[in-house]
Image (cartoon, helix red, strand yellow):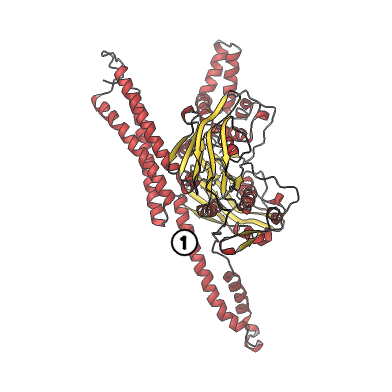
Amino acid sequence: MSQTNVLSVENLGKRYGERLLFDGVTFGLGMGQKAALVARNGAGKSTLLRAICGLEPPDEGRISFASGKRWAFLHQDPAFDTEATIMDQLYAGDNQAVKALHSYASALESGAEGDDLQLAYDAMDQSGGWDFEARAKEVLGRLNIHDLSRNLGSLSGGERRRIALAKVLIEEPDILFLDEPTNHLDLEMIQWLEKHLAQAKMTLLMVTHDRYFLEHVCEIIIELDNEQLYRYKGNYSYFLEKKSERQDNAVAVRDKAKRTMRRELDWMRSTPSARTGKSKSRIDRFYELKTKARVSLEEDPFHIALNPHRLGGKIIELHKVSQGFGDRILFEGLTHHFKRNERIGIVGSNGSGKSSLLDLIVQEAAPKTGKVSVGETVVFGHFSQHGASFPDGLRVIEAVREIAEFMPLKGGQKLTAAQLLERFLFPRNTHHQQIGLLSGGERKRLHMLQVIMRNPNFLILDEPTNDLDIFTLQVLEEFLLDFPGCLIVVSHDRYFMDRLVEHIWVLGEDGSSIVRDYPGNYTQYRLARAEQVAQERDKKELVKKETSQVARNDYSQRLTYKEKFEFEKLEGKISTLEKQKVEAELALANATGHEQLSSISSELGEVTEALDAAELRWLELSEKKPQ
């Protein structure tokens, strides 16, 4: 039995001047289905989302929503009334639960009693206001939003983005559209959001570059490629497998067209008498074959054999470095001597000091205490999360040439600015385009190219994955894996970190000002951290058992012997499942074959379900009293 669509998109088309973004886009989503839209930067992902939501009219086509279904859209750059408070923004709208919550709060503030208070109470019951309030408290806490009286004009871009995300999650619409929901979230927030959306009953259509997110949340991948739409009914691993098959088939079709075209070309070159008026269809077919045979399908991984400046014996030395502002200490006592080709990932909650630490290393800021010593041979390449500022009217190739006309490679070879642009996925026809017309992801890629053009031997990347599509990320990862120098990465992209770094610096862990160093990549850090948390939980439970005195005559909430046995076994089971989940995620990041990807993805889903069930049961039993 087919599922009724709550969203239907039919023959949607959009063009900017001579540039066609998409044409004939048709798809539908049923209630509860979760889909992701993937495409290269500039292909029109965000434009398609805005068109569906009526924010940017398509040139042609039709969009329809099922009757009575509520929808919400998370913009990449949400617009706010800067004079309003966070409370005003979160609790605005026509939602009946919001209205009831306002009425109830007003009744309490005014000291209402009797019938007036009862009416407000009943409205909360009827509208689901209590659930709304509880959901709001959870979402706001998870996204680290606490003081709701703050003025929106005083917030950073990342804070405003989290307010916008909180609003759509609290409203819990039937259909939710998300444009890069993980941007400006720290890793803990992303992991919570991933779990929250996976369990939600709403229909979801999102654009995201987070590949673990795609793997764990989505059941449908919609790819926009060369103005056409392809739908894959499966998660990210399934998409990779089927896309590879589609590309292999396309190459086979192209190669067959080439072989056929060679025969037809001989005929076309023959004397005019051999081509009578009756052969017009054959001539038309030749030009069709010519178009198919010239299709470029192989993707250039832009392997570049860099020849960076030589690193001397002394690279960078941190001597008991600390940083803070006023009375607040971000981190302290950090001592480290960098080694050749060292690769470090830095993680921590928002505001823990990650960017401040990078500023110390590149000597753009002075430490509060301690010393930073940089070797004479170090050439920094610093990619800032704020991006580069480009003058109005500057063209793409001019932005590269202002750094250098060419970049030296190993073996005495050189890459010109134009060649490097092509390696960074800027085709020739975009080189003289004004930068102001580029998408956010394309501007990020151009900023990265400027950094690389300086031929650095010490790369520092602060949130390099924001606004990049998954295809560009794969290409960037391959380039960085071959980079012959030191690398520091700050990123909320777990997949990206897993592939590139060899140990993790954690800032602000458990409120500590000590920078903790974990060997391995991000997933291995999570595995070690999960083990620590499990050990700490075991210690607390042991102390609780030793110190608690349970009244023997209270039988109302006591564990049965069977439940007690189950409870004791659950802690070990949860610890084992947590390790299995992290190990499966690590294996997924390193998997290569299609069958291996599918198998590991299936295993990860089973482990996640088992872990959720075990944690829920543990909570139920922990509320009861022991024997």
Residue 444 placement, left or right of 601: right
- Residue 159 visible in image: yes
Residue 488 in the image: state x and y as whole percent.
Answer: 53, 44
As rendered, which of 314 and 93 lies closer to the eye?
314
Of all residues, the one furthest to the right in this rendering is: 393
Q: Is residue 519 above or below residue 325?
A: below
- The residue beneath circle 1 is 245
Residue drawn at x 52%, y 30% is 332
Residue type at tag 1: Glu
The reply, left or right, for residue 571 in relation to residue 190 is: left
Mark 1 neighbour class, 10 Å CA radius: few under 14, some 14 to 19, many 20 or more: few
Q: Is residue 625 visible?
A: no
Seen from the viewer's position, the closer of residues 603 and 58 is 603
- Please tell me whether residue 208 is drawn above or below residue 517 in the rendered image: below
| Residue 167, percent from left and from top | 58, 32
Q: Residue furthest left?
A: 561
Q: How many marks?
A: 1
Looking at the picture, tell me which residue is in the foreground, 384 or 492: 384
13 to 335, vertically: above or below = below
